[in-house]
Amino acid sequence: MDGYVLTHKIPTHKDFLDTADFDQSEMLDIINTAMIVRDFIKSGGYLNAMFHKSLAMIFEQKSTRTRVSFEVAMEQLGGHALNLAPGAIQLGKHETIEDTAKVLGRMCDMLMSRVDRHESIEALAKYSAVPVINGMSDRVHPTQGVGDMITIFDHWPAGKNPQDVKVVFVGDATQVCNTLCEMTTKMGMNFVHYGPEGHKISDEWLNIGQRNVSQYGGSCMWSDDPKCLEGADFIYTDVWYGLYDKETPKEVYMAEFYPKYQVNDELMTATVNPNCKFMHCLPASRNEEVTDSVLDGPNSVAFDEAENRLTAQRGLVLYFGKVAQLTLDYIKQQKEGK
């Protein structure tokens, strides 16, 4: 198949709220677009596919990677991003989410929002006339999921088929864990959540993973047995207390997760795979869920992963802006000297 031809030239859904809304072929369209565009820009290519297009970025929480990656992505593609930081607009305060969506949808070409509750991103999408991208909610982190899959493809174990690749998420079942479960099983890989029973991935997400497995192959499970680490190709972790856990004291989380679920040199050795890569969505609480020796070590791809947030966002705004195929056609023509 020509890598420059998308299976879905037009998105099957207006909005990108959850990777679970899309089948394998469509997610691969987004990922393929993102990777081709990344390589073209890194080789010195210039794109203006989003010329005169604007992205409203609505944040109910502080953000580093999400804000910067979307803003840079729009600039590199000839467009503009508006940073509507927490408290900067009337969202949910003196104006309803519905009215905010209607107004911004008339002024901007696309919306992206990081929200406190998933219901808010669903409401934005329902009432916005333009595409809405979920920059993270308490349920899922789909833009992170796209960047994660790009990172896994970049560091794919040599000679392995998807059914031979094992990804283990260690620690608390955050929204990042939910999306990783959905995405890896959709790609036919083996997913394991290794964590305490009180913080295990929900049955809902295990069932979603099992449905993917029945269609694409691989496996999906939760375990608190360290033996599940054996054979891992990727070890992934997230903070133990984050943006959605303000009511839980740090000491409580440390007592529940430390030291068994800390990703340290001993845990990486337990994979019995010297080539096992380490992933983290960042920001990291150094020497809590992960030690410096692992995060800064030779097997860490966490900072490649952070850079791939930019790779992912370019693919997403092009795809949901309905100019992905045009962009790939242009890049192909440039490479062929036409």
Image (tube, rainbow, N blue to C red):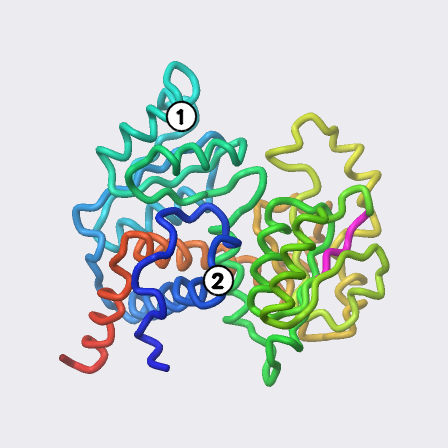
Residue receiving disc 2 = 23
- Outermost residue on the top side: it is 94
- Rendered view: 211 above or below 288: below
Q: Is residue 194 magenta?
A: yes
The span shown in magenta is 192-196
Dot 1 amino acid type: Ile
The local crowd at label 2, few if under 14, some if 14 to 19, many if 20 or more residues have their Cα within 10 Å, is some
Q: Is residue 41 magenta?
A: no
Measured from the top left, where is residue 294 in percent x and y? Answer: 68, 59
Q: Residue at x 75, y 73 (%)?
A: 231
Q: Residue at x 33, y 24 (%)?
A: 99
Residue receiving disc 1 = 97
Name which quarter of the figure residue 3 lies in. bottom left
Nearer the N terminus, badge 1 or badge 2? 2
- Outermost residue on the bottom side: it is 159
Name which quarter of the figure residue 124 lies in. top left
- Mark 1 vs mark 2: give the one in front: 2
Q: CA distance from mark 1 to mark 2?
A: 29 Å
The local crowd at label 1, few if under 14, some if 14 to 19, many if 20 or more residues have their Cα within 10 Å, is many
Q: Identify which residue, 106 or 62, lies in the foreground.
A: 106
Measured from the top left, where is residue 94 in percent x and y? Answer: 38, 14
Q: Residue at x 37, y 55 (%)?
A: 316
Helix, strand or loop at label 2? It is loop
Q: Identify which residue, 314 or 97, lies in the foreground.
A: 97
